[in-house]
Image (tube, rainbow, N blue to C red):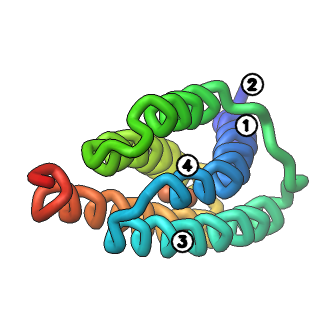
Amino acid sequence: MKTLSDAFEHTLQDVYYAENAISKALPNVIEAVSQADLKKALQHHLTETKEHISILKKVFKSAGLEVKGEKCDAIEGLIKECDGVIKEAKGAVARHAAIIGCCQAIEHYEIARYGTLREWAKAIDQPEAHDMLSAILDQEKAANHKLTNLAVTTINKA
Ligand SMILES: [Fe+2]
Ligand SMILES: [Fe+2]
């Protein structure tokens, strides 16, 4: 990795891997949730996550890069932690708050990656990629905000 373009390509591959891993992990999280609003929010974000995968394919293409994933240890760790919480808190009402905590760690990871990537896209003169990455970033922020709202208005108290 010698140039900013190299770093951009590597990180794009990393987040592409992460989005695919999240789309595979989310159904299990949704299954573990019985609180209706949280279930709905996670189902909605699964749909968005699948959209992120297709937008990322377009980002690769617009930057003239091959669509490729690169194993991301960070997301593997966050997903593993979430699976562990689901098992340990099985059946407990408090699992909903715990699951929100895990999902927010994942959203923050994505927010960090997309924030970095879109600025790098601008710096390496890829305005189209910048706009597509910004659109994903906005959805990640909205998803995170929605989870905060659910936690502080009802779920933490329950
Ligand atoms: Fe995403
Ligand atoms: Fe997300």
Task: Verify CB contact (< 8 Å) between mark 4 and mark 1.
Answer: no
Residue kind at label 2, given as amino acid type: Met
Residue annotated with mark 4: 117
Question: Foreground mark, 2 or 1?
Answer: 1
Q: Residues within 10 Å of mark 3 (few under 14, many from 20)?
A: some
Q: Earlier in the sequence, mark 2 or mark 1?
A: 2
* Residue toward you, 52 or 40: 40
Q: Quick check: 142 left or right of 157?
A: right
Residue kind at label 3, given as amino acid type: Asp
Label annotation for residue 131: 3
Residue at position x 66%, y 57% in the image: 23
Residue at position x 75%, y 44% in the image: 13
Q: Label 3 vs label 1: CA separation?
A: 19 Å
Residue kind at label 4, given as amino acid type: Leu
Residue annotated with mark 2: 1
Q: Secondary structure at mark 1?
A: helix
Q: Label 2 vs label 3: CA separation?
A: 24 Å
Q: With respect to residue 138, does 97 lie above or below?
A: above
